[in-house]
Amino acid sequence: MIEFREITKENFWECVELSVSKEQADFVTSNAISIAQSKVQPECIPLAVYDNDVMVGFLMYCIDEDDGEYWIYRMMVDEKYQSKGYGEQMLEKLLGLIKQDRTRNKIFLGVHKESINAVKLYKRFGFYFNGQVIGSEHIMRLDY
């Protein structure tokens, strides 16, 4: 069972050193940039993802200041731990956490369409492309 933990000075470097494969590198913003973003956009919540005491991934979500909706800004599983079900567990746990807030009923995220495995994962959970494109990312939406 995975758990989310705050990024602290004790686990910061471990989090920054997580990486995806070279083929996926263009699809994911570095964890260092995401953590820095959370310092200037305090609405962003960066979290390390652990399986017991092993950090396997990273995610960041927020209520976006522009539209007042939940956004999953980042979600990555370290290359060493991919294809072991962590992405699915992370998304399921994060959606459960977000859905506790009954004041909203939508979640958005941006994804590169070429990131086929990520698109498949999001679609399995009910996300759909809403036609929006921001930069190089296509926006997916989940209604709940």
Image (cartoon, rainbow, N blue to C red):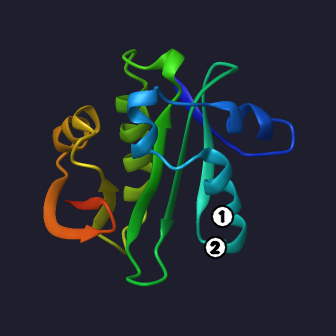
Q: Does residue 134 appear left or right of residue 82 in this picture?
A: left
Residue drawn at x 66%, y 64% is 38
The residue beneath circle 1 is 38
Q: Where the C terminus falls, by quadrant? A: bottom left
Q: Does residue 77 appear left or right of residue 128 in this picture?
A: right
Does 30 sit above or below residue 109?
above
Does 67 sit above or below residue 34?
below
Kind of residue sitting beneath label 2: Gln
Circles 1 and 2: CB distance less than 8 Å?
yes
Residue drawn at x 36%, y 38% is 92
Label 1: how many Cα within 10 Å (few below 14, some 14–19, many 20+): some
Residue closest to the eye, 78 or 91: 78
x and y, in percent, of residue 43 in the image: 60, 71
Residue drawn at x 39%, y 47% is 96
x and y, in percent, of residue 99 in the image: 37, 57
Kind of residue sitting beneath label 1: Ser
Label 2: how many Cα within 10 Å (few below 14, some 14–19, many 20+): some
Residue 20 appears in the figure = yes
Residue closest to the eye, 103 or 28: 28
x and y, in percent, of residue 126 in the image: 17, 48
Q: Does residue 142 appear left or right of residue 32 in this picture?
A: left
Residue 144 appears in the figure = no
x and y, in percent, of residue 142 in the image: 22, 58
The disc placed on residue 101 is none
Residue drawn at x 64%, y 19% is 52
Please tell me how many numbered marks the rendered image carries. 2
Q: Quadrant of residue 18?
A: top right
Distance from Cα at disc 1 to Cα at disc 2: 5 Å
Q: Quadrant of residue 23?
A: top left
The residue beneath circle 2 is 41
